[in-house]
Image (cartoon, rainbow, N blue to C red):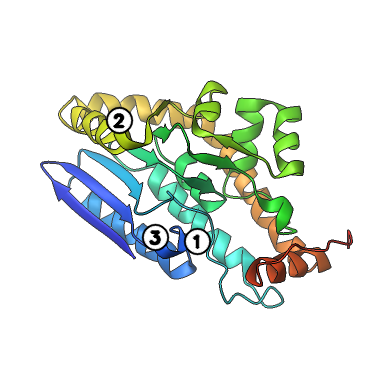
């Protein structure tokens, strides 16, 4: 479930499915897109995105998904449309990231202007265990911020960075103690909402021009590559192993 509330010009959008670590189904992606549309229609002067429970967003919700018939391209197309809406939101946007921030969750962070993370958050690419590839703009983020060698190291191993490590590597803005994260993010978002938001928006548009060409080109290539991987034996095995809560047995086919 996705909720949106607006108070004194500050919108707060909440991923509220803690039992599944806020993993996002196609329906939830549509709800999140609608929440950003609602916030924009309200005239919100800043946005905070957060997750309930133990995680920000653990990625895609693949419970019950049959990899043999999975419409990967359709799902990732919806994610790309959501990310584009988020990135183009006509006011400053902030994310408070704690716990798992993986896959699509990482994409939500990439599409947000300012990301504050809990020091203990877990960020990265767990796709080595799924027979799939990192998506939602993750390749652009890892390559741009970490370089080719470190990016591929994390992709090949599936190892995750803590929030503190991600900030030290330049991936996000600041890391704070987990119990201070939400108040910290709300305070800075409220400060932005009370500021010269037209000037902020002018700077946001300029920054977007500098980064968007690479980001959206990479997202399109990720969508194509993920759709092609759907037809591999390893992709089907990775999905089945995740759903059955066992270790996958990959064959390279």
Residue at 33% from the left image edge and 43% from the top image edge: 89
N-terminal of the pair, mark 1 or mark 2, is 1
Q: Closer to the observer: label 1 or label 2?
A: 1
Q: Is residue 103 left or right of residue 226?
A: left
State the residue lying farthest toward the left.
Answer: 8
N-terminal of the pair, mark 3 or mark 1, is 3
Label 1 crowd bin: few (<14), some (14–19), many (20+), radius 10 Å: some
Look at mark 3 in the image and give the residue it sits on. Answer: 18
Q: Can residue 197 be seen at all in this image of the molecule?
A: yes
Q: Is residue 37 left or right of residue 220?
A: left
Look at mark 2 in the image and give the residue it sits on. Answer: 201
Measured from the top left, where is residue 115 in percent x and y? 41, 34
- The kind of secondary structure element at disc 3 is helix
N-terminal of the pair, mark 3 or mark 2, is 3
Label 2 crowd bin: few (<14), some (14–19), many (20+), radius 10 Å: some
Measured from the top left, where is residue 43 in percent x and y? 17, 46
Q: Can residue 92 be seen at all in this image of the molecule?
A: no
Tag 3 near tag 2, CB within 8 Å: no
Residue at 75% from the left image edge and 59% from the top image edge: 131
Residue at 45% from the left image edge and 58% from the top image edge: 21
**In the rendered image, the vertical position of residue 246 relative to residue 11, given as above or below:** below
Question: Image quarter for residue 140?
Answer: top right
**In the rendered image, the vertical position of residue 125 relative to residue 120, given as above or below:** below
Look at mark 1 in the image and give the residue it sits on. Answer: 78
**In the rendered image, the vertical position of residue 206 relative to residue 29, given as above or below:** above
Measured from the top left, where is residue 204 in percent x and y? 37, 29
Viewport quadrant of the C terminus: bottom right
Label 3 crowd bin: few (<14), some (14–19), many (20+), radius 10 Å: some
Q: Is residue 2 left or right of residue 41?
A: right
- The kind of secondary structure element at disc 1 is helix
Q: Is residue 32 left or right of residue 81?
A: left
């Amino acid at each position: 479930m996705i909720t949106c509330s607006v108070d004194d010009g500050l919108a707060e959008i909440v991923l509220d499915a803690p039992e599944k670590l806020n993993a996002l189904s196609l329906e939830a992606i549509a709800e999140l897109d609608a929440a950003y549309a609602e916030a924009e229609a309200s005239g919100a002067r800043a946005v905070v995105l957060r997750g309930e429970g133990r995680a920000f967003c653990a990625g895609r919700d693949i419970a019950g998904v049959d990899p043999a018939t999975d419409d990967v391209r359709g799902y990732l197309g919806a994610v790309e449309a959501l990310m584009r809406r988020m990135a183009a939101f006509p006011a400053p946007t902030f994310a408070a990231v704690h716990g798992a921030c993986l896959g699509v969750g990482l994409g939500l962070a990439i599409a947000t202007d300012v990301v504050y993370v809990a020091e203990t958050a877990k960020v990265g690419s767990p796709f080595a265990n799924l027979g799939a590839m990192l998506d939602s703009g993750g390749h652009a983020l890892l390559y741009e911020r970490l370089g080719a060698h470190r990016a591929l190291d994390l992709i090949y191993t599936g190892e995750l960075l803590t929030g503190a490590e991600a900030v030290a590597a330049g991936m996000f803005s600041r890391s704070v103690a987990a119990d201070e994260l939400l108040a910290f993010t709300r305070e800075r978002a409220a400060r932005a909402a009370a500021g010269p938001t037209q000037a902020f928006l002018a700077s946001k548009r300029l920054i977007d021009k500098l980064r968007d060409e690479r980001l959206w080109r990479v997202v399109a290539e990720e969508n194509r590559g993920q759709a092609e991987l759907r037809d591999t034996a390893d992709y089907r095995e990775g999905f089945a192993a995740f759903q059955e809560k066992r270790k996958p047995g990959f064959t390279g086919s």
